[in-house]
Image (cartoon, helix red, strand yellow):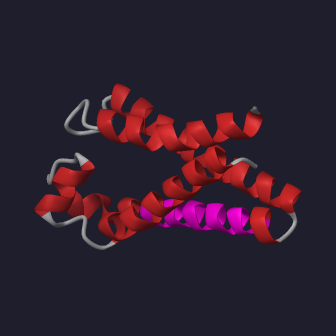
Amino acid sequence: MNAVAQLSAGLSALILIAVFPFEAFFIHRTEVQRFLGIEPHGIRNVHLWSFCIGARNALAGVGTLIGLWMVNFGDQSTGVVVVVAACIYMLLASLFMGIADALGYWLPRGGSIKGTVLSSVLPAVALIAIAI
C-alpha cells in the first residue's frame, strides 16, 4: 500500500475519531450544531442516533488505524483488506448522508453538502490509490 493511500486513510480515520466526541457528547452545544451543519430543533430526540453514529464512525476510524498498523508491522495483505473495508464503509456512510439530505431528512436541507463532500474525499483517494 503506497504512502498516498496510507496518508488518506489515516487522516480520514483520525478525523472520524476526533469528531466522535462532538456527535456523542457535545451535540447539544450551539457551536457543535453549527460545525455539524444541523438545526437545534429536536436535538434531545436524535441524541441517541448521533451517539451511535459517532461511535460507529470512531470504530471505523480505529479499525482503519489497526489495518494501517497491520500493513506496516503485521500481515500486510490482511491489513490492506481491513483498510479497504473501513474506507468503503467511510465512503458509503458519507454518500448515504448526502442521500438522506436529498430525501429531505437533513435539516436544514442542503446542510450535509459540505460534510458529505469533505468526508468522501479522503476515503475515495485512499481506495483509488490502493487500486492503482
Q: Is residue 97 magenta?
A: no
Location of the C terminus by quadrant is top right
Q: Is residue 67 magenta?
A: yes
Residue 20 percent across, percent down from the top left: 40, 66
Range of magenta residues: 51-70
Q: Spot the residue most to the top.
A: 102
Name the quadrant containing residue 82: bottom right
- Residue at the (32%, 33%) spot, across then down: 113
- Residue at the (43%, 59%) spot, across then down: 15
From the viewer's perspective, is 72 left or right of 112? right
Name the quadrant containing residue 131: top right
In the image, residue 70 above or below residue 2: below
- Residue at the (59%, 60%) spot, across then down: 60
Name the quadrant containing residue 74: bottom right
**Frontmost residue, 85 versus 69:** 69
- Residue at the (65%, 65%) spot, across then down: 63
Q: Spot the residue most to the left.
A: 30
**Frontmost residue, 84 versus 33:** 84
Residue 110 percent across, percent down from the top left: 26, 30
**Frontmost residue, 93 versus 104:** 93
Residue 89 percent across, percent down from the top left: 61, 47
From the viewer's perspective, is 43 left or right of 132? left
Instruction: State the predominant SS element of the stretch in magenta.
Output: helix
From the viewer's perspective, is 94 left or right of 28? right
Q: Is residue 52 visible?
A: no
Residue 12 percent across, percent down from the top left: 50, 53
